[in-house]
Image: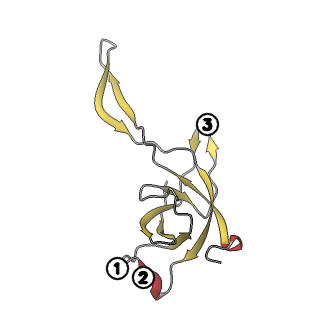
Amino acid sequence: MRSLQRNKQTIWYRLLDSNPTPITKTDEWGNILETGEYAQTYLDPVRLKINVRQATGASIIEQFGNLDNYDKVLSTTWMDCPITGTTLLYIDKEPTETDGVWSSHDYVVRRVAKSINGISIAVRKVDVS
């Protein structure tokens, strides 16, 4: 009963690509030059069923310490959950793709707290334009 299926809702997450693309420039003679910088890209959204709850109550405040800049808490007993501090989340809306570009996310991860039996993730709502 730690992680009941009926308490879970569908969210989507996008992980940071572990193989960033090198940024290149072309000089006036047509030579391709590497700048030494890399473009951070995200993978396609992945569907996940997880418990989502509002951030209220003293136990949540103690769980993340003095962190008060979060709106919801995701909790799961799936110990291999890939969500990290760089993950983009779609909680209140579904991601859509238009011409190869994904719609903007609506939540970001503030903190991940792991225990022996589960993981709690504090998330904050963002307005991406």
How far from the left and from the top, in percent, is residue 38?
Answer: 35, 37
Secondary structure at badge 2 equals helix
Residue occupying image coordinates x 45% and y 63%: 109
Q: Are marks 2 and 1 in contact (CB under 8 Å)?
A: yes
Residue occupying image coordinates x 51% and y 70%: 118
From the image, tell me which residue sits under label 1: 66
Secondary structure at badge 1 equals loop
Label 2 amino acid? Ile
Residue occupying image coordinates x 69% and y 70%: 5
Label 1 amino acid? Asn
Quarter of the picture holding the N terminus: bottom right
Nearer mark to the viewer, of 2 and 3: 2
Nearer mark to the viewer, of 3 and 1: 1
How far from the left and from the top, in percent, is residue 8?
Answer: 66, 69
Label 3 amino acid? Asp
Identify the residue at the far right of this view: 6
The answer to whether 56 appears left or right of 24 in the picture is right
Q: Earlier in the sequence, mark 2 or mark 1?
A: 2
- Tell me, for residue 122, which label it has, or none: none
Name which quarter of the figure residue 33 lies in. top left
How far from the left and from the top, in percent, is residue 12?
Answer: 60, 56
Q: Earlier in the sequence, mark 3 or mark 1?
A: 1
- Tell me, for residue 99, which label it has, or none: 3
Front-most of residues 124 and 117: 117
From the image, tell me which residue sits under label 2: 61
Cα–Cα gap, marks 2 and 3: 42 Å
Question: Badge 2, how many Cα within 10 Å: few under 14, some, many 20+?
Answer: few
Q: Earlier in the sequence, mark 2 or mark 3?
A: 2
Front-most of residues 114 and 25: 114
Secondary structure at badge 3 equals loop
Q: Is residue 86 above or below residue 123?
A: above
